[in-house]
Amino acid sequence: MDTRSKELFEAARRHIPGGVNSPVRAFGSVGRTPRFIASAHGSRIVDVDGNELIDYVCSWGPGILGHAHPQVIEKVREACLDGLTYGAPTEREVQMAELLSKLMPSMEVSRLVSSGTEAVMSAIRTARGYTRRDKVIKFKGCYHGHSDGLLVKAGSAALTTSVPDSAGVPSDYTRNTLVALYNDPDSVEAFFRANPGEIAAVVVEPAAANMGVVPPAPGFLEFLREITEKNGALLIFDEVITGFRLALGGAQEYFHVTPDLTTLGKIVGGGMPIGVYGGKREIMEIVSPLGPVYQAGTLSGNPIATAAGLETLRILQADPGIYRRMEEKAKRIEDTVREAAGDRVCVNRIGSLLSLFFTSVRVTDYESAVSSDTASYARYFGYLLDHGIYAAPSQFEAMFLSDAHTEEDVETTCRVIRDFLRGME
């Protein structure tokens, strides 16, 4: 039953656009009423009607240790007793920057902000200031937050002028954003040939997770590293999702490709709002107050967020087996889908991230991802929800595993998924 959730959703719609504070939460693409959550512990969330669900959204990634990890909660409680915000430097900010430079050596110098969107926006500004160029290449299907310059889509061909992907974004804001095709080196080369000496940076999700999970093709990230170096542009890895998810050193450790700038969010805050951007010292030292690239934030380096993030990273650092355990559990779900669905469903997995695409084609980019049958995904989502499993309410989002998911959780999940897929035959 979801009586109370329905009541709250109706109330929310009177005062909040669409009744939610982030669009996917509205369950619009799956034809359901969103569940309003009352509490969460470990691998489970409990909604306001008392329904307990195995959670594979994990707050869209931060919950790598599960919900309400006791060590993280204790550090947050201790920090709260000292005050919520100061608008002044704290020791934990220094500790965070030092730890990041150790875990991700490419982040020699970093700046804390309050969200992943802010981190990417600031990294782009820094790249433009450093190179003294304006144009940026992004990839169709990769999401880098909702800043105006990155909310764009490509036209009928890769070199078509980019147009805003949201009302309220002037076309002038996006005219310097070039949209290439993920896993397609030719589309990137074409932009560099057409814009010699004008491209400041290439920004990419090293493993795409915002059109569903789409891993990079072999050699693709290496190609981006090579072509940016050749043309004097910077390579920016958006690791808001992959940072500390694929490995302790992020996707750059996992794939052995080093970017010039990195953006982080989600896990680095341990469940609290935070973002980080950073990279080579010579690049980051053009950021104010040292240099001419301005960026500021009242709540940047918030003492509660840094307390949660530091403890989360230290737990991951102390127990590297977490990554093996999560990957093994994710692979069991992947294997279940392959066995039950055959070639009727494509399943992509990398580490503890996975997605089911209701399409018979292999999903390698945006075009193959959108070939998915979203109506079938909606039925799949509803079946899981009705059987006590909370998955992403969108075909084009990831399924997140956490260290808190138990063998029993995974076995239950595999059984429910198997029953649904076999019922499609």
Image (cartoon, grey):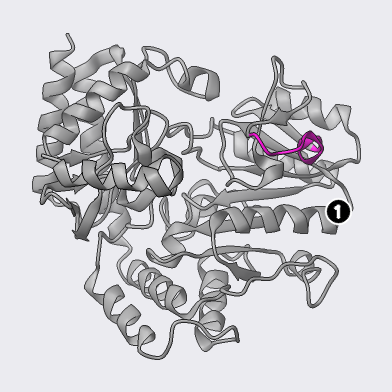
**Residue at the extreme top:** 425
> Which residues are the magenta region?
167-176
Which residue appears at 24% of the width and 68% of the height? 69
Q: Based on the displayed image, in which of its 4 quarters is residue 181 positioned? A: top right
Residue located farthest toward the bottom when viewing the structure as drawn: 82
Q: Is residue 27 magenta?
A: no
Question: What residue sits right under mark 1 in the picture?
Answer: 131
On the question of residue 213 being in view, the answer is yes
Q: Main secondary structure of the magenta part?
A: loop
x and y, in percent, of residue 285 in the image: 78, 71
* As drawn, 278 above or below 308: above
User: Residue 78 or 221: which is nearer the viewer?
Assistant: 78
Q: Residue at x 72, y 21 (%)?
A: 158
Q: Is residue 365 above or below residue 167?
A: above
Front-lying residue, 2 or 178:
2
- Judged from the image, the secondary structure of the residue bearing numbered disc 1 is helix
Above or below residue 70? Residue 185 is: above
Q: Is residue 152 left or right of residue 40?
A: right
Quick one: quadrant of the N terminus?
A: top left
